[in-house]
Image: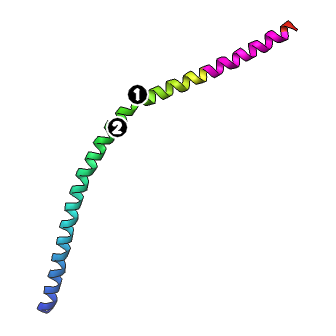
Amino acid sequence: MDDKRLTRIEEKLDDTNDHLASIDITLAAQHISLKEHIRRTAILEADLAPIKKHVNMMSGALKLLGVLTLAAGFIEVIIRLATK
């Protein structure tokens, strides 16, 4: 191989190494950002736990109210049929 060709190959390798170093820097910055995002997400999920509990309680209360209303309706129908 001639010297020009070897020089070109070395330049391409140097460019590739520089590009890989740039990628490593970007990945390191993204990793820090991801860690912060995970931390904030965990905090928000913990804050939402009481809200989810309240929503489940209200849903249960409404279902209970529905069942009681249905039972009261049946009882009223039975009383009306019995008094006729």
Q: Find the residue positioned furthest to the right.
A: 84
Q: Residue at x 20, y 66 (%)?
A: 22
- Residue 71 forms part of the magenta stretch: yes
49 on left or right of 73: left
Colouring used for the render: rainbow
Give the residue number, with chain letter if any, for mark 2.
44
Q: In the rendered structure, which amino acid carries the disc numbered 2? A: Leu
Relative to 34, is 74 above or below?
A: above
Using the numbered discs, state the Cα–Cα distance from disc 2 to disc 1 in whole angstroms. 11 Å
| Residue at 64% over, 22% down | 66
- The spot of residue 80 in percent (x, y) is 82, 11
Sequence-wise, the earlier of marks 2 and 1 is 2
Q: Position of residue 76 (x, y in %)?
A: 76, 13
Q: Quadrant of residue 13?
A: bottom left
In the visual, does 84 lie left or right of 48? Answer: right
Give the magenta range: 65-81
At label 1, which amino acid type do we have? Pro
Q: Residue furthest left?
A: 3
Read off the residue under disc 1: 50
Q: Quadrant of the C terminus?
A: top right
